[in-house]
Image (cartoon, rainbow, N blue to C red):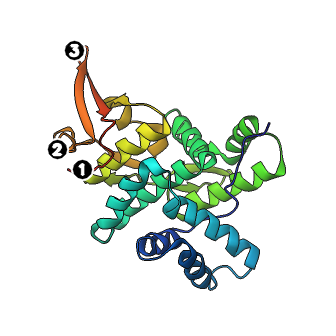
């Protein structure tokens, strides 16, 4: 059985920002009406607009129940976050909502650790191997690539390839906590080595080094040593909030 794809078209950062700002103010039914009105200037076709609304709602409104407290706390501080920090949040929530997006991100991140440029053909080939050689996979791959390009995470080269843009530096311990939570969720793990989080390919567009001292203030995590050198961050099951 083929794995579901779901990522149907390009998603713009301004649409994600608008969705985030409306999420805690409106009911689910109201959100669909509000988004339909907002998107009319950018998306003329009713079907395309409906697809976009479905994606935006899945990323910000209909999030996994385990991440609802995290999402809500992000929204409580959303207006205080920088544009770069918001982009990191959009990136993380999109990976959780759409495993296909996550898998493209992981492939880019893994390959960028080995080389400076990656061909779109290589990404397309890898996604077809994972999801099946079908038109829907081609469309979804194109949608993810154009989304990442519009977010300025990657930039095209003359050889139908991509290189990573200048990495976005994230120093806010609150966003560091978010990154740790997202990785623990995506990787379905209760603990990870801190060094593993620092260089994880899933967050390849971002440059961050976890503020371990700051993170120790968050009730959602505990830390312990594994051997002499390795510091491990562990999720406390009874604590789902990322705020101290």
How many C-alpha atoms fall within 10 Å of the one at disc 3: few (<14), some, or many (≥20)? few
Name the spot of residue 35 as percent of width and height, x first: 57, 78
Q: Earlier in the sequence, mark 2 or mark 1?
A: 1
- Residue displayed at 69% across by 67% down: 51
Q: Which structural element holds mark 3? A: loop
Q: Are marks 2 and 1 in contact (CB under 8 Å)?
A: yes
Mark in the foreground, 2 or 1: 2
- Residue displayed at 49% across by 72% down: 19
- Residue displayed at 67% across by 56% down: 7
How many C-alpha atoms fall within 10 Å of the one at disc 2: few (<14), some, or many (≥20)? some
Q: Earlier in the sequence, mark 1 or mark 3?
A: 1
The span from disc 1 to disc 3 (Cα, nearest Å) is: 25 Å
How many C-alpha atoms fall within 10 Å of the one at disc 1: few (<14), some, or many (≥20)? some
Residue for badge 3: 228
Q: Note whether residue 21 is visible.
A: yes
Above or below 145: residue 46: below
Q: Which structural element holds mark 1? A: helix
Name the spot of residue 209 as percent of width and height, x first: 28, 41
Looking at the rendered structure, which numbered label has been put on residue 217? 2
The span from disc 2 to disc 1 (Cα, nearest Å) is: 10 Å
For residue 34, what is the image quadrant? bottom right
Q: Which structural element holds mark 2? A: loop
Residue for badge 1: 173
Name the spot of residue 217 as percent of width and height, x first: 17, 44
Name the spot of residue 190 as percent of width and height, x first: 38, 31
Q: Are marks 1 and 3 in contact (CB under 8 Å)?
A: no
The span from disc 2 to disc 3 (Cα, nearest Å) is: 23 Å
Q: Note whether residue 81 is visible.
A: no
Residue reaching furthest to the right: 134
């Amino acid at each position: 059985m083929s794995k579901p794809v779901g990522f149907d078209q390009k998603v713009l950062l301004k649409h994600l920002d608008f969705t985030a700002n409306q999420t805690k103010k409106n009911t689910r039914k109201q959100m669909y009406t509000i988004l339909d009105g907002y998107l009319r200037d950018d998306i003329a076709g009713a079907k395309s607009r409906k697809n976009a609304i479905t994606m935006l709602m899945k990323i910000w409104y209909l999030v996994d129940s385990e991440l609802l407290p995290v999402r809500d706390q992000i929204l409580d501080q959303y207006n205080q976050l920088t544009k770069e920090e918001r982009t990191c949040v959009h990136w993380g929530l999109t990976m959780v909502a759409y495993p296909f997006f996550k898998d493209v991100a992981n492939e880019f991140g893994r390959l960028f650790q080995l080389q400076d440029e990656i061909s779109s053909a290589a990404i397309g080939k890898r996604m077809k191997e994972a999801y099946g050689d079908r038109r829907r996979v081609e469309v979804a791959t194109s949608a993810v690539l154009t989304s990442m390009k519009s977010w300025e995470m990657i930039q095209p080269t003359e050889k139908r390839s991509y290189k990573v843009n200048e990495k976005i530096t994230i120093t806010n311990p609150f966003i560091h906590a978010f990154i740790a939570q997202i990785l623990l969720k995506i990787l379905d793990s209760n603990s990870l080595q801190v060094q593993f989080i620092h260089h994880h390919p899933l967050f390849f567009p971002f440059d961050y080094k976890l503020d371990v001292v700051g993170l120790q203030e968050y009730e959602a995590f505990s830390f312990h040593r594994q051997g002499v050198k390795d510091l491990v961050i562990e999720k406390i099951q009874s604590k789902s909030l990322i705020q101290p």
